[in-house]
Amino acid sequence: MNNTTTKKIYSLETLIFVVVFFGLFGSLASIMGLSNMMNTLMNTAYALLMDTVFYIMAISVIAGAIGSIFIEFGVIAILNKLLSPLMKPLFGLPGAAAMGIMSTFLSDNPAILALADDISFRRYFKKFQLPALTNLGTGFGMGLITVTFMMGLAPKDGGSFLSAALIGLLGAAIGSAVSVRIMLMFTKKMYGTSEEAYEGNDQGSMVSELRVIHEGSWAGRAMNALLDGGKQGVKLGLEIIPGVLIICTLVMMFTNTVENSIYTGAAYEGIGLLPYLGTQIDFILQPLFGFTSAECIAVPITALGSAGAAIGLVPGMVANGMASGNDIAVFTAMCMCYSGYLSTHVAMMSVLKFPELTGKSILAHTIGGLCAGISAHWIYLLFF
């Protein structure tokens, strides 16, 4: 899809961009030194590529393979049937929306668009419910990879983050439900509750009753499913590289600090701006999220643009003792619920043909993401 347009050669935004760009990098260079800043920029990007991106890609391949074979042999279909009765009371959506949760949980936010484009899927929805699919899908996007990644981290004192990651998954579900419900409040006022999302006699492919499988024997189907799922994992791993290297590098340079302010141009050096800002609003963050350190605020902020980049920040925090089990629960919830929604919401609402509701969708999901983190924190305190 081509989202380009035209504009005057120069305008006010040109001046604003120049001021912001040089102000951003000028502040880094004034503290770190220009040469050190450039070296840290490149070294951090390279270190993230080698230490984080390929690790996430490996997890994506394994998670993709598992998800694909579960789909092949009907496990996901069974889960869909089990989840369907919960959709109306929790999300205010028909049971078919559970398929959207499954598709985005196994891949990323835009996966729900393929379902929304299918007639047999749309016919279950009223018109006012259709825009909320963006909020529903975003709440569970990158879910399997995020949860698996968090489970694989090792606490400094031993043990496991398994329980924390599962609590985060529950928090993400709560945040998504809040986001969808708020969005439905907006759309009910605009479209009412009686107009159908699809009007026609063509019933489509009945995707809710049938599943597509590979041809051949059980063993052949299993192998093909594993390989196809693994290929999708490689594709996803490649797609997150720009987000991790660009966003994560900049966030780290504004988050990390160095001892005695002696900069050498090494990877992961920074000026500590975000932790400083975090300490200024710690009286708000602590009761809401219970962060172990001020640096933790960088993770949900990064998740707004890229969930892959956000989870890339976490291993270093865990290794340095800046993140605990509670933080992992909150990170999992907010990384899933936000999962790069600022970079996908506009396109997703456009594809669904509700671009005028983009602002309301973003507002609803901003509130939902905060509720996801808050819920994960208090549920974690309840059990631990």
Image: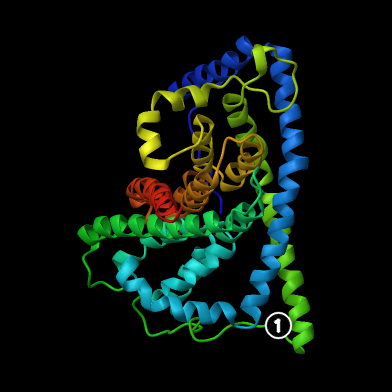
Q: How is the image coloured?
A: rainbow
Residue at 54%, 67% in the rendered image = 103
Foreground residue, 109 or 326? 326
Taking the image as shown, residue 254 lies to the left or right of residue 289, namely right
Q: Is residue 287 above or below residue 344?
A: above
Packing grade of label 1 (10 A; few <14, some 14-19, many >=20) is: few
Q: Is residue 282 above or below residue 25?
A: below
x and y percent of residue 161 in the render? 59, 53
Q: Quadrant of residue 278?
A: top left
Taking the image as shown, residue 352 lies to the left or right of residue 67, namely left
Q: Is residue 16 above or below residue 318?
A: above
Q: How many marks?
A: 1
Taking the image as shown, residue 359 lies to the left or right of residue 23, namely left
Dot 1 falls on a residue whose secondary structure is loop
x and y percent of residue 194 in the render? 22, 73
Which of the image's four quarters has the N terminus?
bottom right
Residue at 66%, 19% in the rendered image = 258
Q: Residue furthest bottom?
A: 217
Three-letter residue code for mark 1: His
x and y percent of residue 26 in the render? 59, 14
* Residue 314 in view of the camera: yes
Tag 1 residue: 214
Q: Quadrant of residue 48?
A: top right
Foreground residue, 136 or 193? 136
